[in-house]
Amino acid sequence: MRELELLAPARNADIGIAAIDCGADAVYIAGPKFGARQAAGNEIGEIARLCSYAHRFGARIFVTLNTILYEDELEQAGRMLEEVVRAGVDAVIVQDLAMLSLARGLGVPLHASTQCAVRTPEKALWLESLGFSRLILERELPLGMIRRIASAVSCEVECFVHGALCVCYSGQCYLSEHIAGRSANRGACIQACRSRYDLVDASGRVLVRDKALLSLKDLNLLGRIPEMARSGVTSFKIEGRLKNESYVRNIVAAYSDALDSFIAGAAPGTWRRASFGRVTRNFTPSPQKTFNRGYTELFFDGRRSQWSSMDVAKSMGEEIGTVISLSRRKDSFRVRPVSGREKPVLSNGDGLSFVSRGGDVLGVRADVCSSDEVRCKPTPELFEGARLYRNYDRAFEKSLESNPSVRLLPVEVSVELSGDVLRVKAVSEDGREAVREIPAGVPAENVSRMRSLFEAQLSKVTGIYAFRCSNLPEHGLPFLPVSAINEIRRNLGADLDGMPFRVLGMYVAPSSSTLPSQKPLRTADYKDNISNSLARKVYAAAGVNPVESAYELTHRKGAELMRTRYCVRNELGLCPRQNAEDLYLLNNGRRLTLHFDCHSCEMIVTAD
């Protein structure tokens, strides 16, 4: 039986706990330093608290130490690696190959971050041969390539299924470092891809003015879970370590439902979730109601579509209609719903947004809503014909806040009589067993009522356990007061708590010495992000010399700042299919050159 894992992001331990309660099988979170999101660091004690909670349900915690490391940081990174292992983490997500040396002897699995740019079977085989137990693939891959990579390796394969998209191949974006000296590979990206640019040709003619030409929509593969699972994907990853709790709860719930639906519809014994417990919640997840720039499946089917969010690089929310009439003071308006869609129910306090005639995204709070009419503070930029979006659904957010999910471990309870001893046995979903034996005492006069009491009191919730009494003897039950039966259940819960929680065993890589030797396909260059002596030794051991240092150390002239599947020409309908001439992006006096590799169907960004 194959295990499928839903992997959720967590900015902090509380959000991680909320993700587990909503159905996540694993959570990834940053440590105090060296994570690819500088603003999402966490103290070791908080990571330990999250590990302790997650392991109660067999869920796992992965820590991100996925920046490149400079020579003077190796010792500190090694100490931090030891600390997170002592805190109880189940794996560490890394980019820098120095971590292979720093983790030696610690017994912790290493996952190759998406920053390692895994997009071919050959690269995947090489990383597996180094000892990685999991590979996190590039987001741009079509399903066919995902299948080829998963078939080539024996380690786990993880894929992103939801969230923000980098326009560039992961781990090989140097635009932020070039512009501001803030490296994306060091967790300090300025998100220049969300900036607005003019697009001009070689003659200086402006083709597009003031658009976020490098900004992509967000990924949404909610409907593609079955295909991915059948292609060998082990872990389904949600992006968002900077997102808030409501985002995480909503998106985790949506994908958890999708995984459960797929497993329920498959042949029995084929698949199972990678953790334990049953989730109860009283809200219906809706990805449209959470932060997004519009959704895309990117290159999943090997075809191009409209990937860009160039008009608006921010979250607009769900489109609800068009402003069709506006008061003179612009403090009230009527909304015509989107054609073909159900009329939205607007609530007082909803947050609305629109794009002004000047191209700016502006917001307005719906103070009073009545049918299709909204009253608000005077909003001079609002105009008739404006497309209106809801980026804060007050009723939905209130439902999320007031209906926290509850995750419980099912426990089957059976009762039997053995001579003059009453034996009560509890077996949890994760296979732990606890037994309590007490003297049987005097047989109950009203056997039917006693059976009902036993069944009712041994089928309640205690702590994280949802007890269910499934087997009672037909005759001879002793008389016990309700308090005594409850005490048995509580003692069984305490006994289960005192046992080691079971975490399902997924793949752990064997020693790299037992795997076939693999070599990189080419001489290592700045795109391999080699920034210290330990990483350099990994390549030297593979026979790769000389080894070029990372862009952050060299600022190599003429380097590709980005290479991407996304193509501005294609997006704008300007694709000649071959021999496309260069175009240029202008922003605040700075010029970037766009080259078009039509043979590979890729766009390349360089600096003048």
Image (tube, rainbow, N blue to C red):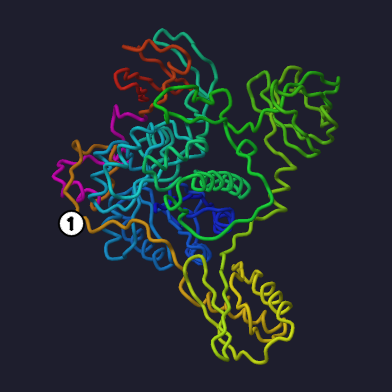
Q: Return the x and y of residue 356 as percentages of the image width and height.
A: 68, 22
Residue at 53% across, 75% down: 496
Q: Return the x and y of residue 381 as percentages of the image width and height.
A: 74, 23
User: Which one is nearer the viewer's eye here, 273 or 556?
Assistant: 273
Tell me where the magenta segment starts and ends, as one range: 535-562
Residue at 74% across, 31% down: 344
Identify whether 437 is placed above or below 200: below
User: Which one is nearer the viewer's eye here, 341 or 45?
Assistant: 341
Locate the N terminus and report the quarter of the image it occupies: bottom left
Please tell me whether mark 1 sits on a helix, a strand or a loop: helix
Q: Residues within 10 Å of mark 1 (few under 14, many from 20)?
A: few
Residue at 47% across, 40% down: 225
Locate the C terminus and report the quarter of the image it occupies: top left
Inspect the magenta stretch and tell me whether residue 181 lies in it: no
Q: Return the x and y of residue 5 as percentages of the image width and height.
A: 45, 51
Residue 407, quarter of the rendered image: bottom right
User: Which one is nearer the viewer's eye here, 422 or 237?
Assistant: 422
Disc 1 designates what residue? 513
Residue 180, quarter of the rendered image: top left
User: Which one is nearer the viewer's eye here, 580 or 182?
Assistant: 580
* Amino acid beneath label 1: Ser
Residue 146 is left or right of residue 481, and the answer is: left
